[in-house]
Image: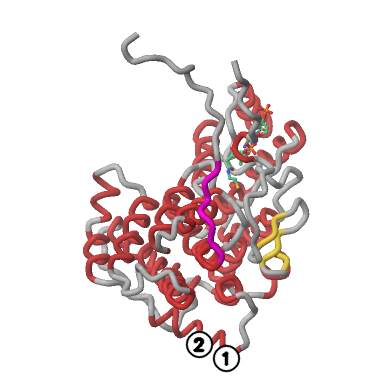
Amino acid sequence: MTTAPTHAKGLEGVIAGETEICKVEQAALIYRGYEIADLAANASFEEVAYLLLVGEKPTPDQLAAFKSELVANRNLAEPVLKFLRSSGDLVNHHSAVPMDILRTAVSIAGHMDQDCQDNSPEANLKKSKRLLAKIPTIIGHMQNSIDRTDFIEQDPTLSHSANLLWMMTGKNPSEEAVKVMDVSLVLYAEHDYNASTFTSRVISGTLSDMHGAVTGAIAALKGPLHGGANEAAMDMLAEIRTDIGHENDEAKINAWMQSAFANKRKLMGFGHRVYKNGDHRAPILHALGRKAAEARGDDFVKLFELGESVQNIMETQKNIFPNVDFPCGMTYFTMGIPVPQYTPIFVASRITGWCAHIMEQHANNRLIRPRVAYIGPAPRNWND
Ligand code: COA
């Protein structure tokens, strides 16, 4: 009997390509040469989006033109609007969740994009900007449909982050809320060969189109081991609160955690394939989210205190650190965002990273087609 060649389960540690877009290390996350803490402190989401898509930081004129182009592309074609009018029913009465609605809406948007089948660099850049501009509109209209209200129209005076909040709620967001949203989008924008980006590269590596690659990436991001973890992390904290109340009794928190450990439960928002000593995006978002909670009131601060206790137990007893999705769940909850929209909001940011990778793949393509070790039955005859 031949033994199968060894392989890295989950492709752990495998270098599967080259990129100029992003570098993920234990102690640094770098977008095109700029460290994430620098970007979170000093760059707007639109500046980071431009950096990722075009390759360089924009000049003030380039940024102004980019923002105008995004605003001009926010509206959706009638077939997408028609689908979104039915999305509330699909979520409220059928089996869809917002990530599914977003996936289908992006796919329909592709049918209406005149450059859909054109993979040239010029067409791909145009499509990247259109997708970036339209995704908040899709999320907003979908939430309106779920809430059974009329579609809230985009506000061309608002930034990407502010408009996203406005379209979901119809309330003018505070400056602080916009800042928190903007930083969260900067933190989420890009992360090298994570599962959804790798998916987008495999699809575009067949010379398939950008909308198809993004549709596949959305499906990959949905899973709770990837982007879906921000929703799952908040669901887990809500479950702890249901089980032990809101008073953050340390003994009860510890007992809940010991039971989770005994049941070998994966705690959502913790752990990472690359960052084994902690995800440095997490403390940046935690600090901002906590400040928002302090402004919002006692129960929100208690949520963060619960999160801090859970984090402390995970770190001291398991040596496992929170990833960015853990503070994201608490932060978006504090901002009053419905939990099932947390991962779609992640898409409103990561679309930049995906599109940059799809363009990089198309510009220097080779089909991505690895091998697999066969471990099935030995050869046998059908008539035996
Ligand atoms: N809760 C409990 N234990 C965890 C854990 C978590 N969130 N993450 C990792 N571990 C444990 C594993 O059970 C494993 O323990 P073992 O060696 O006793 O079996 C050990 O840590 C190593 O983890 P492993 O499953 O090999 O890590 P991975 O690289 O395959 O998986 C994740 C990485 C992100 C999929 C994993 O940490 C996870 O499922 N986290 C929760 C989901 C999440 O937050 N995803 C967002 C990622 S940004």
The mark found on residue 119 in the picture is none
Q: Which residue type does callout 2 highlight? A: Ala
Residue displayed at 32% across by 71% down:
113
Give whichever of 157, 173 is nearer the camera: 157
Asked which secondary structure carries label 1, the reply is helix
Asked which secondary structure carries label 2, the reply is helix
Question: Is residue 367 a member of the stretch shown in magenta?
Answer: yes
- Main SS class of the magenta portion in the image: loop
**Cβ–Cβ under 8 Å for marks 1 and 2:** yes
Give whichever of 132, 195 is nearer the camera: 195
The mark found on residue 65 in the picture is 2
Which image quadrant is residue 210 in?
Answer: bottom left
**Above or below — where is 298 with respect to 185?**
above
Mark 1 Cα shell of 10 Å, populated few (<14), some (14-19), many (≥20): few
Quarter of the image with the C terminus is top left
Residue 226 in percent (x, y) is at 54, 46
From where the camera sits, is residue 333 visible? no
Mark 2 Cα shell of 10 Å, populated few (<14), some (14-19), many (≥20): few
Q: Which residue type does callout 1 highlight? A: Asp
Q: Which residue is mark 1?
A: 61
Residue 165 in percent (x, y) is at 45, 67
- Which portion, as a residue range, is magenta? 364-370
Residue 77 in percent (x, y) is at 27, 72
